[in-house]
Amino acid sequence: MKLATLPSKDKRNRNGELIVVSKDNRTAARVEPVISLLAALENWKEVAPKLEITYSALNQGSAPGSFPLKLEECLAPLPNSPGFYDGSAFLSHVFRARKSRGDEMPPSAKVTPLMYQGVSDNLLPAYVPMDLMDPAFGGDFEGEFAVVTTDVPKGTKASDMGPFIALLMLFNDITYREIVKQELPGKFGFLQSKPNSSFAPIVITPDEAGSAWDGKRLSLDLEVTFNQKLFGHPNGREMHFTFPELVAHACRTRPLSAGSIVGCGTVSNEDKAMGFACLTEKRFQEILDGGKETTPWLRAGDCVKINVKLNGQSLFGSIEQTAR
């Protein structure tokens, strides 16, 4: 099942209106009564089967009130989430970062995932510009997968996490790299270096990914185009920490509310020929290969496209953003 969010005619409604999207991303149907995706997730066991009926009818061309869908009009699927937790599940990304600085990978990196709690309100649509604010901030993009949960009890183990993972999504974790360098030495986590992220317009139920989703990882290429040239197509299969493990880490000492988003960190592969999903990892590799980075941070006018395809069809709709 595919879902998305359109703006509400009621300006007081910050969460938008949930719609069901056809498998080919071309048509949609509104949900009656009107609800947001967040409200649906809060009552997922009751609401999901009704949405599945609409989805089936939509794909058969029999859904009442269906209409052509313009993905560029969609909001982020969850414009406001109760929690956004972003991990670092790909060890090749961490390895390149440390090796480029002359450091070794600590044993703990394979045991406990790195994770921070990020901005969860005012999440951005897929087509809005990336605001550089100041070139000295070192703007970067990061292509990532994420899961969306229902209510997860505190202390839920990874082995029991399956029923709590409701949806899969794709997002661009926008980062100010030069501010990261200022914040990390304080050892109190990210704040100003992690502004609002942008999300692909469509979220999917795990079954929509077919065999590419094994309950732990999404084994599909994340295609990144930078200024109309292929920048990378790393595959999600090399996650060291699985999504159930990431969610379990996030809920170790707290419950997670329905609609919580848990990201996997920059999708990365050991083979550099797969390319990269962020500028900083390419810069790490340039240091390893030639002694110094040559790729600049984002500049006004740079264009980034992030997409994932299954059987030739965009799974989430693409993220297409220009820096300003």
Image (cartoon, rainbow, N blue to C red):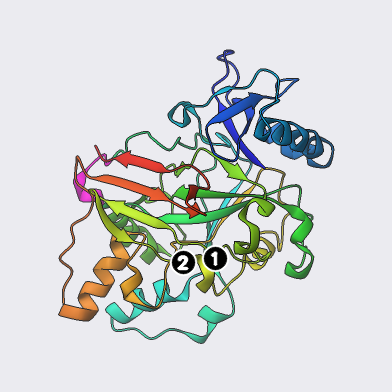
Give the residue displayed 33% in from the left and 40% down from the top. 321
Give the residue displayed 52% in from the left and 54% down from the top. 310
How far apart marks 2 and 1 lie (CA) works out to 6 Å
Amino acid beneath label 2: Asn
Q: Position of residue 132 (x, y in %)?
A: 27, 42
State the mark number for residue 235.
Answer: 2
Q: Is residue 159 left or right of residue 168?
A: right
Q: Position of residue 234 (x, y in %)?
A: 41, 66
Secondary-structure class at tag 1: loop
What residue would you read off at disc 1?
219
Q: Is residue 10 left or right of residue 151?
A: left
Amino acid beneath label 1: Ser
Q: Is 294 covered by the magenta stretch? A: no
Q: Looking at the image, is 199 positioned above or below residue 284?
A: above
Residue numbers of the magenta segment: 132-138
Give the residue displayed 31% in from the left and 47% down from the top. 304
Q: Position of residue 86 (x, y in %)?
A: 53, 57
Q: Is residue 154 among what the camera can see?
A: no
**Which quadrant would residue 241 be assigned to in this image?**
bottom right
The one nearer the camera, 134 or 229, is: 229
Quadrant of the image for the N terminus? Answer: top right
The one nearer the camera, 177 or 292, is: 292
